[in-house]
Amino acid sequence: MRVTINLVLTLLLIATLNGCGFQLRGNYQLPETLQAVSLQSQVSKELSEHMEQRFIHSGIQVSKAEQPVVVRLLSDKLERRTLSLFESGQVAEYELLYQVNYQLFNNEKLLLERTVEVARDYQDDPNFALAKTREREMLVDEMRAEASRLILQQIISEMSE
């Protein structure tokens, strides 16, 4: 009896998750028109690598040769804004803003031109400058990965329409 109840509850949970449209993060259903892309980049090497890895991981072939679908990464910019100060007047906390401008073309027709923005808070401590520098580098790399994920989501959404 207990096994039957567990089975019914499991099936009910699966049906509920499936019915609400839940999908594992990073699991995309690719439209047929998005099997291969040409990635043209004028941004940092790190972002280009994240974007290429994101495409490959999603099952999209990345080619340097011209493809019907072209993704152009136009610019990326990292800004830092002060959020709070120590009593001494030194900066205690920053907000890091990472922006990426990109375009999506299909058969040389501009489909999409957008800016993706990712923000993170970063606490600074001048007593641990080396450790905080490394932490900031890791945070910026995480922001690049998040920006590439958002770009891919927007591209898939646009190509699915």
Image (tube, rainbow, N blue to C red):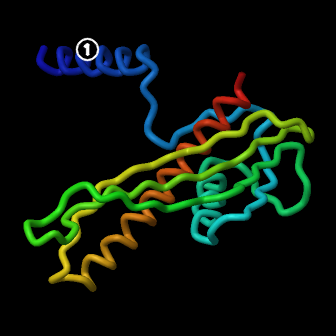
Residue 157 in the image, given as x and y percentages of width and height: 64, 30
Residue 31 in the image, given as x and y percentages of width and height: 72, 32
Q: Is residue 21 above or below residue 77?
A: above
Q: Residue at x 65, y 56 (%)?
A: 56
Q: Quadrant of the C terminus?
A: top right
Q: Residue at x 49, y 57 (%)?
A: 145
Residue 149 in the image, given as x and y percentages of width and height: 53, 47
Q: Is residue 40 above or below residue 90?
A: above
From the viewer's perspective, is 74 left or right of 78?
right
In the displayed orientation, state which residue is furthest to the left: 87
Q: Label 1: which residue?
A: 8
> For this rendering, which residue is in front, 135 or 33?
135
Residue 97 in the image, given as x and y percentages of width and height: 43, 54
SS of the residue at dot 1? Answer: helix
Q: Residue at x 71, y 39 (%)?
A: 113
> For this rendering, which residue is in front, 106 or 93?
93
Q: Is residue 147 above or below residue 156?
A: below
